Image (tube, rainbow, N blue to C red):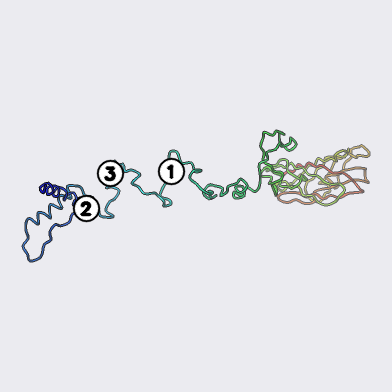
Amino acid sequence: MKKLILLLTILLIPIFAWSAPPTRSYVYTAGTSINPDKVTANEDNLFTYVQGGIDTIKDGTIVNADISSSAAISDSKLDTITTAGKVDTDALTGTFADLGTLLTGTLAVADGGTAATTAADARTNLGLGTVAVYDSPLPIANGGTASASTTYCDLTANVTGTLPVGNGGTGLTALTTFLLTTDTRMTVAYTTWDTTTTGTLAVTTGFTPTKVIFFYEDQGTKEFGIGLDDCSGGGGAGSMSLYMDATANTWDTQTTVYSIFDCENGATTHSKAYITSTNATSFTLTFSKTGSPTGTLNIICIAFK
């Protein structure tokens, strides 16, 4: 039994020793004789450790070249990457996790989210205003189909301000003057005028006009006409109009001052105008009247650059 214990002790001592860097079994003292057996024992400790495989490496000595390309290191041995910029997004492939199962709270706008939990808050955070979905039948008169199965964006109750002409709107809060079409050389615009009043009316063209043709009429009456204006600003020979005298039921001309001449009754009752000024984006009509005309003029303006 004693021999068995001795044998096990001899076999296990190297195992305990090899599991850590080797140490000396004996030390030497200056001025004393060195026992060869002690030297051999110290050397055996070193040789046994090296032959069994080195399990301790000095910090900072391993570089990328020391790791085999076939090492196949398991990701379970890697720490979680938390430092920003350590993963190139171009290197990411495959199927990604469902963010809905991973995120709590809201995703910031800067990170591609809306920072909101409701549609209304999302529109606000994204700068979309308060435009809501209109889920009721939109009448045909309002550009819809009157079908309850179609979803629209309700622009009647939730939009403030005006939509610029360049974005498909009129740039106006009321349909008094708006562009029908425009390009770099010509603009077609529509406007109205209350013939019971006098004053000025600006018409947008998008450029400085040099010539304007007017088509005008007073709905429900015989009053209508065609006018020409050279935009010189003074009326005179540069303005003329061919118009219907609603009372006399005859055609007449105005060739001295006015390019718009809405005639209710010859020389006694009419509303009239001509271009008094222009600028880089519009022209201005100045309206005056004789007598007490009534009604509203519908005016189409064709302006040339």
Q: How many marks?
A: 3
Residue at numbered disc 1? 90
In three-dimensional space, the C-alpha distance between marks 1 and 2, rounded to whole angstroms, equals 43 Å
> Is 18 on the left or on the right of 262, as rendered?
left
Give yes or no for contact between labels 2 and 3 (Cβ–Cβ under 8 Å): no
Q: Secondary structure at mark 3?
A: loop
Residue at numbered disc 2? 20
User: In terms of sequence position, does the residue under pointer 3 or pointer 1 come before the other?
Assistant: 3
Relative to the observer, which residue lies in front, 251 or 78? 78
- The type of residue carrying mark 1 is Asp
Point out the residue furthest to the front here. Answer: 1
**Residue displayed at 28% across by 55% down:** 59
**Residue displayed at 11% across by 54% down:** 41
In three-dimensional space, the C-alpha distance between marks 2 and 3, rounded to whole angstroms, equals 24 Å
Percent across and percent down for residue 286 are: 82, 50
Percent across and percent down for residue 93 are: 43, 40
